[in-house]
Amino acid sequence: MLNKITKKITNEIIVTVPNITEEKAEQIQYGLYIAISDGLKLIAVMLTAYFLGQLPLALAGGAVFALNKSFLGGVHAKTQLGCVITYFIFLFGAIYSSKIIDISCFNIILFVVSGILVYFYAPADLASKPIITKKRWKELRAQGSITVAVFFIITFFVPREYSNLISIITFINSINITPVLYRITKNRKGGIINEKI
């Protein structure tokens, strides 16, 4: 259904704006599809969090997840429904786990493991969303490493449940860039298209 809606909007744009190539039209439709589906997913998650009384933690967790994902990347579910379900499980699992875990050095252990995984596997490079150049790969790797380091520092200055939440979500993000997850989710690795730029 969402595909039909984005196709219709794209067709309206093609009629209105001159000289749009077929390739550009595909990019527009894909961008619309992602924006609308992510927007609906975010609304559903935040409404659920609001009714469960977990909105502040959901906002914090969603921000950490989005920032990590934007630099580290990660595997994708094959369907939008699968994406919504896994996002709900990850976010609310992390929220409720963060409230009950009270283990000394928990955050340090998770961040050490996350840092190692980021060092070896970041950024994720998928066939569906390939990294175009070696330069871009290096930028994403540096930005992802800095983001993880900043989140680690933040965990020392926020309440325990927020600290746990940041650590758990960062750990989930770092697991999502590993080759094991590529195989489990049947995501294909991309490969840098242009080494020289």
Image: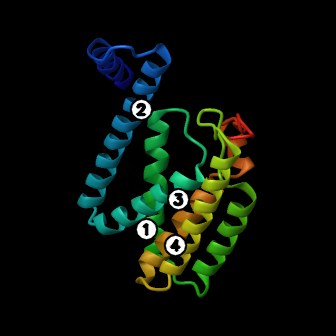
**Could you give the CA–CA distance between mark 2 and mark 1, rounded to whole angstroms?**
33 Å
Task: Give the residue at mark 2.
Answer: 31
- The residues bearing labels 4 and 2 have C-alpha atoms spaced at a distance of 29 Å
Which is nearer the N-term, disc 3 or disc 2?
Answer: 2
Q: Where is residue 105 in the image (x, y as percent from the top left)?
A: 61, 85
Label 3, label 4: how many angstroms apart (C-alpha)?
A: 9 Å
Give the alpha-carbon distance from disc 3 to disc 1, as whole Å: 20 Å
Of 110 and 119, which appears nearest the observer? 119
The single residue placed furthest to the front in the displayed view is: 197
Picture coordinates of residue 23 (x, y %)?
A: 50, 18
Where residue 12 sits, quadrant-wise, is top left
Pointers 3 and 4 in contact (C-beta within 8 Å): yes
Residue 152 image label: none
- Total tally of numbered discs in the picture: 4
Name the residue located 49 percent from the left edge and 56 percent from the top edge.
Answer: 90
Cα distance in 3D space between marks 1 and 4: 19 Å
- Indicate whether 123 appears above or below 25: below
Residue identified by numbered label 1: 96
Q: Nearer the viewer, residue 18 or 193?
A: 18
Judged from the image, the secondary structure of the residue bearing numbered disc 3 is helix
Q: Mark 3 highlights which residue?
A: 68
Of the image marks 4 and 2, the number of the one nearer the N terminus: 2
Q: Earlier in the sequence, mark 2 or mark 1?
A: 2
- Disc 3 from disc 2: Cα separation: 20 Å
**Which tag is nearer the camera, tag 3 or tag 1?**
3
Q: Which amino acid does label 4 sit on?
A: Phe
- Name the residue at 47% across, 78% down: 163
Instruction: Provide residue 62's location: percent of width, then percent of height.
Output: 40, 59
* Amino acid on which the number 3 mark rests in the picture: Asn
**In this rendering, position of residue 68 left or right of residue 92:** right
